Amino acid sequence: MFKSNKYVFFDLFEQQIATVHKGTHLFYEMIGNYQDLEAKVKAIKAVEKEGDEIVRRIMNELNSTFITPLEREDIHQLAHTMDSMIDYIDGVADRMYLYQVRQPDPRVLAQANILVKCSAKLIELIRTLRKLDHQVVSKIAREIKDLEHESDSNYRKMVSDLLNAPDANPIEAIKLKEIYDKLEDCADFAEDVSNLVEGIVLKNA
């Protein structure tokens, strides 16, 4: 059965955000059961590579399709912003292993849980591209924004505790601050995806 290019793009976007969600879930499991880190980091890396492959397929479709269902710039930007989320998750997991973080702060688990919730909401959001329902998009986008605000508050507390600890080791603090920053950046990318989808729906509704 013939499948139009319109549905090919939407299928690929849905596959990509499912990969992001899988990555956030694996990271959450890694932090929640902080053992066998090398194997868990490799599993997240494998998911990141899946995401890269989907982006490659999206770009190939974009280059070979004359008329696209959404503006080319929007397709390009959306694909790469979603990819940034899984890139950062992979980067954080890798750093935690390479920097030999012994036991993460409990708020890292909270941050990982927020990312799982964000990516689950993004799955719902990406599905709306098929119908361009602005009311539904706005509701989900508000929920993602609330999660990003929760992430931001959690991040500020983590950094404050880290930098104000009386017995803080400066080298360890630098390592952990980098990890916390990238976790917060990942939540920011989730909101960026949400903003992009809102803009796409407004332009095409």
Image (cartoon, rainbow, N blue to C red):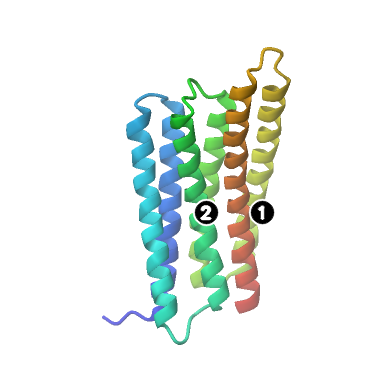
Q: Position of residue 192 (x, y in %)?
A: 62, 57
Give the labeled residue for mark 1.
142
Looking at the image, residue 183 sits to the left or right of residue 46; the answer is right
Q: Position of residue 12 (x, y in %)?
A: 40, 66
Q: Is residue 205 visible?
A: no
Residue in the image at 64% along x and 39% along y: 151
**Callout 1: SS:** helix
Q: Position of residue 178 (x, y in %)?
A: 60, 35
Occupied quadrant, residue 73: bottom right
Residue in the image at 72% along x and 26% along y: 160
Residue in the image at 40% along x and 50% along y: 48
Residue in the image at 59% along x and 65% along y: 197
Looking at the image, residue 129 sits to the left or right of residue 41; the answer is right
Say which label, 1 or 2, has the lower sequence index. Answer: 2
In front of the other: 172 or 78: 172
Occupied quadrant, residue 148: top right
Numbered label attached to residue 195: none
Give above or below for 205 relative to 172: below
In front of the other: 108 or 88: 88
